[in-house]
């Protein structure tokens, strides 16, 4: 008899190890940011600073306004009481002298159901403003003085799947204190402080037995998760085959699989104890998805498992070797498959699982540990019953075409889940992970279909070594950390461009699009040059990135109506005092651009 299961699991685990290695190299904990005196742009959020008055009198009351603009589906946690791990938004102003700040005035948050904790939390999303009231000193203030002020920003920006904690840097400005300051027309008015809403329906309100029952149901529900299905047919078919040969061994193998599931949840319980005892924090269910490296690794793993469900790859072992392997490592393999099944359940877990896990975090260590382990018991129970009642194994439908169609259907479900995870990645990482996923699929296809049973061992080794090498090399290329942008690009804005030109400031506009391969070449060959980036900074050039990915973007409309150009790539340089820009339509114009920049004062 030919057994293919151990080799398949071994290959999957190897791919997971490789992917995790690549992603850990490719995703730093913090992102580099481009800071400007009045504006911060970090990935999915833009923060700007505005003064209520251009100048204030000694002893006067005034304020700063911090404007936040988040991209769609992203939010800040608003309340320190409910935000996980003190990840709420913090705005901290400071001035060395003459200025005294009051408590910041935050807007009213909106209630949001957080799947990671199973609670309704208060968040800020879209556009909102935080006001920083202050008073100017009266005594010992010069007749006119400029006071430097900085504003620190801290907090996590999150979606349903992940959170990021960027290094925002600091906003900075100066507040002019003058005895003759005109304070008649404020640019904005400071609203009264908002009352904090009471949070109800939190996870801690569950009764003990109800919460444990919820935890059990949550674990039970993990068995119907599509992500778990790739390994379930493997273990069930092994149990069926072993039951025919040795019923007692089938029972022990089944319990070994259950032990692997419990081992995963025991690891979570131990991690929770360590975090609470030594670090004073808790382990949130879903925290792993706040790490882009884990999100990328899981999405690639799901793609690999989808290919397995499609029958793209398999490793066939001779019966003699398979039997020896089963005798020595069968129990270890069952434990490993149980552990893997528990890991795979996490991308598809229902909100009921998050609620049960969140309740555990609000309890003392003993009830919390019991609740986490009850989740594992709920997931393992069906398999314990299956192996304890041999008659149930005999009733399992025989393999046939229906099983192949079912497996392939689950493969498509896995691809949908993988796509959902990939879309949660940072924008600058998303495209690279997509490219690598295609190459990874090709390597697996090469591994599984370029060799047959009668292919010579040397040819098998050659093909598979090449497949692994290709995956490793391309993994380092696509998943390694990208270099930080050397140029502080700003989004296309006609008003900003016109203002800079009126001030005789040089303006550089790079029209690009996400689908434009030539534009990416321009970025690599021209705007990644350190000498050009240094000249742009040294000559105080306003650098504008004109995104024309979609037809309704401002840069797309301007490209057609203002600049009368048919498409991208296009780079424009407005020299001071000129009415028409210098235009470059090609790819290798770096030296020409450098020459023009050197002419600037």
Image: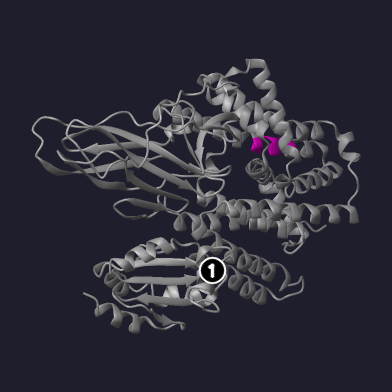
Front residue of 557/544: it is 557
Residue 107 coordinates in the image, percent (x, y):
45, 33
Residue 297 coordinates in the image, percent (x, y):
57, 53
Task: Please tell me whether residue 193 belongs to the stretch shown in magenta.
Answer: no
Q: Secondary structure at mark 1?
A: helix
Regarding residue 167, the answer to whether it shows in the image is no
Residue 64 coordinates in the image, percent (x, y):
32, 39
Front residue of 184/212: it is 184
Q: Residue furthest front?
A: 184
As drawn, 257 above or below 471? above
As drawn, 380 above or below 225? above
Give the magenta part as a residue range: 254-261
Prevailing secondary structure of the magenta residues:
helix
Task: Please tell me whether residue 258 belongs to the stretch shown in magenta.
Answer: yes
As drawn, 381 above or below 512? above
Reading the image, the residue beneath label 1 is 556
Residue located at (61% from left, 24% from top): 371
């Amino acid at each position: 008899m030919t057994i293919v299961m151990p080799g398949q699991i071994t290959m999957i685990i190897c791919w997971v190890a490789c992917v995790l290695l690549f992603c850990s190299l490719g995703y730093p904990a913090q992102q580099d940011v481009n800071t400007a005196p009045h504006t911060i742009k970090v990935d999915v959020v833009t923060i700007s600073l505005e003064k209520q008055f251009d100048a204030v009198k000694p002893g006067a009351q005034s304020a700063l306004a911090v404007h936040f603009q988040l991209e769609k589906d992203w939010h800040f946690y608003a309340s320190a009481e409910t935000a996980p791990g003190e990840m709420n938004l913090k705005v901290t102003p400071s001035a060395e002298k003459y200025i005294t700040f009051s408590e910041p005035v935050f807007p009213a948050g909106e209630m949001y159901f957080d799947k990671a904790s199973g609670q309704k939390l208060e968040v800020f999303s879209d556009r909102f403003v935080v006001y920083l009231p202050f008073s100017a000193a009266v005594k010992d203030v010069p007749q006119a003085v400029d006071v430097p002020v900085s504003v620190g920003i801290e907090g996590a920006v999150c979606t349903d799947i992940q959170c990021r904690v960027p290094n925002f840097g600091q906003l900075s400005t100066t507040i002019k204190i003058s005895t003759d300051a005109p304070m008649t027309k404020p640019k904005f008015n400071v609203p009264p402080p908002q009352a904090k809403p009471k949070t109800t329906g939190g996870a801690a309100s569950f009764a003990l037995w109800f919460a444990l029952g919820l935890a059990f149901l949550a674990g039970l529900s993990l068995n119907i998760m599509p992500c778990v299905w790739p390994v379930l047919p493997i273990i069930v078919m092994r149990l069926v085959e072993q039951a025919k040969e040795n019923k007692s061994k089938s029972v022990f193998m089944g319990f070994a699989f259950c032990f692997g599931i419990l081992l995963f949840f025991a690891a979570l319980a131990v991690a929770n104890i360590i975090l609470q005892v030594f670090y004073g924090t808790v382990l949130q269910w879903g925290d792993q998805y706040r790490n882009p490296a884990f999100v990328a690794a899981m999405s690639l793993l799901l793609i690999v498992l989808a290919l397995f469900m499609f029958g793209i790859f398999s490793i066939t072992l001779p019966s003699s070797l398979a039997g020896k392997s089963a005798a020595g490592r069968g129990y270890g393999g069952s434990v490993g498959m149980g552990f893997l099944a528990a890991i795979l359940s996490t991308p598809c877990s229902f909100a009921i699982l998050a609620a049960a896990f969140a309740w555990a975090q609000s309890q003392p260590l003993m009830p919390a540990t019991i609740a986490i382990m009850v989740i594992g018991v709920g997931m393992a129970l069906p398999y314990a019953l299956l192996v304890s009642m041999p008659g149930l194994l005999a009733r399992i439908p025989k393999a046939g075409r229906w099983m192949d169609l079912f497996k392939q259907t689950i493969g498509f479900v896995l691809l949908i889940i993988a796509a959902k995870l990939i879309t949660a990645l940072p924008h600058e990482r998303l495209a690279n992970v997509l490219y690598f996923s295609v190459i990874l699929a090709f390597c697996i296809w090469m591994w599984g279909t370029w060799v047959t049973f009668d292919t010579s061992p040397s040819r098998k080794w050659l093909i598979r070594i090449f497949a692994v090498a290709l995956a490793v090399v391309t993994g380092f290329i696509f998943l390694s950390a990208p270099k930080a942008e050397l140029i502080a690009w700003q989004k296309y804005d006609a008003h900003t461009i016109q203002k800079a030109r009126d001030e005789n400031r040089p303006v550089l506009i790079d029209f690009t699009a996400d689908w434009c391969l030539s534009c990416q070449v321009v970025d690599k060959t021209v705007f990644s040059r350190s000498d050009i980036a240094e000249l742009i900074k040294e000559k105080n050039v306003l650098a504008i990135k004109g995104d024309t990915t979609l037809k309704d973007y401002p840069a797309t409309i301007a490209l057609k109506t203002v600049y009368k150009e048919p498409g991208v790539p296009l780079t424009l340089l407005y020299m001071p005092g000129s009415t028409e820009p210098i235009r470059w339509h090609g790819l290798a114009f770096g030296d020409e651009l450098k020459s023009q920049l050197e002419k600037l004062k």
